[in-house]
Image: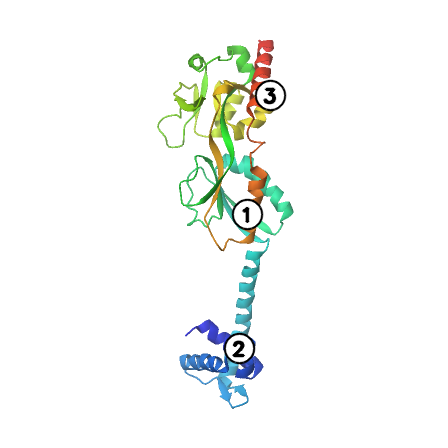
């Protein structure tokens, strides 16, 4: 027996006082209504209606059951309708996973913009620099910096992430600027080591059409990208900083890009989500908003011409300071 359908049919028949009228309202037959009520009576072991050919009325047991379940059924139906409507409208929760730097630098401004347009949508932002169990943690969509997601998901590359070699004007005034990758060995360098890894990451360069890697000796090595950038900003040495973190400091002149012809753009920022036919409207709307707002990422990368111009201006300032 379908208990929920049987109770709903019982309530409708009790309120209307007729199996025929209940059938008309529910879009079914009087026989189907009678069967549902009979199954409920058999399940409970009591008679719920006094029946005649024209009319039905509740027994004492039927009246007690109606009083017990009517309010609960109305609350249950109301809850179902709220969920159904929220899935179609701009309200409800969107759960997003991302790495820490991406969440703070890229997503928080984006969420603020979206919230002004859609105040009924709330967010749960899960910031972890490790793979996230999107199913187990009920994640609606995620953002991944680096290589494209390998899981069975829909993914969109939003913009390239550049690895920019850079230093402060003060450091360059004191130590000079390297003219080639070979000259980097004579400089103080700041490196990055992934949490839990035994060795620092090598630096990555573009050499024509090839990606090449260069192991370095680091004066300081950090397991957090923002700490790595902080060491470079404090003049401790040359670092290779991702463009999400580095771009505002390069444009402000706090950092100077170096060897820009070797800047790697192999990595990217990817938006990903599971393929779903029943995706809530709020999630689909946010995905479209994120793709439209972040496509080509002008705030988080520098075109080659701008990189070259900043490099030239920065070296000139460093020589003047020296």
Q: CA distance from mark 2 to mark 3?
A: 73 Å
What residue lies at 56% left-to-right and 61% top-to-bottom? 82
Residue indicated by mark 3: 253
Label 1 CA crowd tier, 10 Å (few <14, some 14–19, many 20+): few
Of 208 and 289, the residue lying toward us: 208
- Is 233 displayed left or right of 220 in the figure? right
The first of marks 2 and 3 along the sequence is 2
Tell me, for residue 11, which label it has, or none: 2
On the image, the x and y values in percent for residue 57 come to 54, 86
Tell me, for residue 123, which label it has, or none: 1
Q: Circle 1 — which element? A: strand
Q: Are marks 3 and 1 in contact (CB under 8 Å)?
A: no
The first of marks 2 and 1 along the sequence is 2
Q: CA distance from mark 2 to mark 1?
A: 39 Å
- Is 148 displayed left or right of 290 in the figure? left
Label 2 CA crowd tier, 10 Å (few <14, some 14–19, many 20+): many
What residue lies at 45% left-to-right and 18% top-to-bottom? 189
Label 3 CA crowd tier, 10 Å (few <14, some 14–19, many 20+): some
The first of marks 3 and 1 along the sequence is 1
Q: Circle 3 — which element? A: loop
What residue lies at 50% left-to-right and 27% top-to-bottom? 162
Q: Is residue 40 above or below residue 245?
A: below
């Amino acid at each position: 027996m379908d208990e929920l359908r049987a109770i709903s049919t019982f309530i409708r028949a009790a309120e209307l006082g007729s199996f025929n009228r209940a059938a008309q309202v529910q879009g079914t037959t009087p026989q189907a209504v009678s069967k549902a009520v009979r199954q409920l009576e058999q399940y409970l072991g009591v008679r719920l209606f006094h029946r005649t050919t024209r009319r039905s009325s509740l027994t004492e047991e039927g009246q007690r059951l109606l009083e017990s379940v009517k309010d609960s059924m109305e609350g249950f139906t109301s809850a179902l309708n709220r969920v159904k409507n929220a899935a179609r409208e701009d309200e409800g929760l969107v759960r997003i996973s991302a790495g820490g730097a991406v969440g703070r630098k890229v997503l928080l401004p984006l969420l603020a913009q979206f919230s002004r347009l859609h105040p009924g949508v709330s967010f749960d932002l899960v910031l972890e620099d490790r793979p996230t169990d999107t199913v187990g943690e009920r994640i609606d969509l995620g953002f991944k910096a680096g290589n494209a997601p390998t899981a069975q998901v829909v993914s969109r590359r939003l913009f390239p992430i550049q690895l920019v070699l850079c230093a402060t004007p003060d450091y360059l005034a004191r130590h000079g600027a390297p003219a080639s990758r070979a000259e980097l060995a004579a400089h103080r360098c700041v490196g990055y080591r992934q949490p839990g890894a035994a060795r620092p990451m090598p630096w990555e360069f573009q050499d024509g059409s090839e990606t090449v890697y260069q192991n370095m000796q680091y004066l300081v090595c950090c397991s957090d990208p923002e700490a790595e950038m902080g060491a470079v900003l404090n003049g401790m040495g040359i670092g290779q900083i991702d463009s999400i973190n580095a771009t505002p400091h390069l444009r402000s002149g706090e950092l100077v890009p170096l060897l820009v012809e070797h800047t790697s753009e192999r990595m990217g920022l990817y938006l990903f989500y599971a393929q779903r036919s029943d995706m809530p409207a709020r999630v689909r709307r946010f995905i479209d908003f994120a793709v439209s707002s972040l496509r080509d990422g002008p705030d988080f990368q520098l075109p080659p011409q701008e990189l070259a111009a900043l490099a030239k201006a920065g070296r000139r300032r460093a020589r003047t300071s020296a």
